Image (spheres, rainbow, N blue to C red):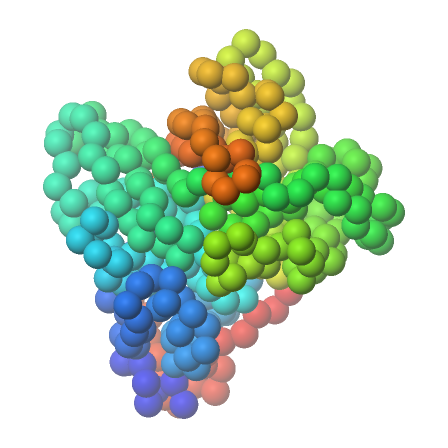
């Protein structure tokens, strides 16, 4: 029973980044052991108590099917200020750009990281896919934006055939801290619009699961990062001088929809566009979401990871606090840890 493990209350601080929620648990009430963040994630996946903690915060009636959040844990070493385990209704993810942006704002707003009244400060965070940075910008003591500097990102495979209920698709698979299948929505007669969301979710799930156990879903250095995390559908909105403009929706985990333009997904798209020669020096990716929010993506550096051409991506956005919660856990409640109805 959950009441035997969790306290009667659980405190969270909630943000949204581009419309996508991020629920921060700064002091998880269940032990999550491990020497590194990646090790803690692996143990959390197999720990029923940690899974119950995740479930109670993202399931109804305290959450919803598209809820997202993170447990703050110690960093791998003194080079980072904190670590985080990202979670959603289906488990624990390897990367989260919108969450990293929210954590940067939270770290400065709570005083965990001292920041100048005007200027910038780096909030270095260890995540399961590696060490990332939330560069927080301030003006007159107000946070004005955050640059998320991710791990190296690259294209894994191109022109991969996938059979779907809407016909044959051909996708590009890319890594941006998590592995994504990407394709233009028009390829299957769709567009990134709310009225097409049901089809985008259904076919996005088909593509993800068709590729999840294939050679295209393998990380070359860490098998804990294997698996296709989601499908990125995009629309071309036209290139202009110094800018590539696209709209996307990312269907991640098992049918969840990212309301933001997806931070780690934007990094995967940057890797693809750079490999296509569409991001010469100084060019920005203007990445819109299905709800109209925007991230700006840039390539900071280009280098090789083994035999792959990789980029160092940066995604710029902003997070806003939406509230604080003290959730109650009643040992008599038969619906603890909750349910997902969709």
Report the label total: 0
Residue farthest top in this picture: 241
Q: On the picture, is 106 further left or further right than 309? A: left
Q: On the picture, is 202 further left or further right than 39? A: right
- Where residue 145 appears, as percent x and y from the top left, is 32, 31
Q: Nearer the viewer, residue 233 or 63?
A: 233
Q: On the picture, is 36 further left or further right than 162? A: left
Using the rendered image of the protein, determine whether residue 12 is visible from the camera's viewpoint. no
Instruction: Look at the picture and state if 171 lies above or below 336.
Output: above
Instruction: Look at the picture and state if 225 lies above or below 329.
Output: above
Residue farthest right in this picture: 167
Residue farthest front in this picture: 307
Using the rendered image of the protein, determine whether residue 340 is visible from the camera's viewpoint. yes
Quadrant for the C terminus, please.
bottom right
- Which residue is at a point 43% across and 85% down the rendered structure image? 333
- Where residue 255 appears, as percent x and y from the top left, is 63, 57
- Which residue is at a point 36% across and 54% down the rendered structure image? 127
- Where residue 172 appears, as percent x and y from the top left, is 68, 40
Instruction: Look at the picture and state if 321 lies above or below 332.
Output: above
- Which residue is at a point 40% across and 73% down the rendered structure image? 44
- Where residue 52 appears, as percent x and y from the top left, is 43, 77
């Amino acid at each position: 029973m959950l009441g035997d493990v969790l306290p009667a209350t659980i405190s969270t601080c909630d943000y949204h980044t581009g419309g996508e929620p991020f629920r921060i648990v700064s002091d998880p009430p269940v032990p999550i052991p491990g020497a590194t963040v990646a090790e803690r994630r692996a143990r959390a996946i197999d720990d029923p108590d940690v899974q119950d903690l995740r479930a109670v915060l993202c399931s109804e009636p305290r959450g919803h099917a598209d809820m997202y959040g993170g447990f703050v844990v110690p960093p791998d070493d003194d080079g980072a200020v904190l670590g985080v385990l990202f979670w959603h209704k289906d488990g624990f993810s390897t990367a989260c750009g919108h969450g990293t942006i929210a954590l940067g704002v939270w770290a400065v707003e709570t005083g965990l990281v001292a920041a100048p009244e005007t200027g910038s400060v780096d909030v270095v965070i260890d995540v399961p896919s590696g060490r990332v940075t939330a560069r927080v910008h301030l003006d007159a003591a107000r946070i004005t934006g955050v640059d998320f500097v991710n791990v190296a990102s690259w294209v894994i495979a191109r022109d991969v055939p996938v059979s779907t209920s809407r016909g044959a698709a051909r996708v590009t698979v890319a890594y941006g801290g998590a592995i994504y299948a990407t394709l233009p929505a028009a390829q299957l007669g769709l567009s990134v619009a709310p009225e097409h969301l049901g089809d985008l979710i259904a076919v996005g799930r088909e593509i993800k699961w068709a590729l999840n156990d294939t050679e295209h879903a393998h990380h070359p250095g860490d098998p804990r990062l294997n698996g296709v995390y989601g499908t990125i559908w995009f629309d071309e909105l036209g290139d202009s001088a110094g800018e590539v403009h696209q709209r996307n929706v990312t269907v991640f985990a098992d049918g969840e929809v990212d309301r933001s333009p997806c931070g780690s997904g934007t990094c995967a798209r940057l890797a693809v566009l750079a490999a296509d020669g569409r991001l010469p020096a100084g060019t920005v990716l203007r990445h819109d979401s299905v709800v109209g929010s925007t991230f700006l993506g840039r390539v900071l550096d280009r280098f090789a990871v083994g035999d792959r051409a990789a980029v160092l991506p940066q995604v710029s956005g902003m997070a806003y606090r939406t509230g604080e919660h003290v959730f109650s856990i009643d040992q008599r409640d038969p619906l603890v840890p909750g349910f997902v109805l969709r």
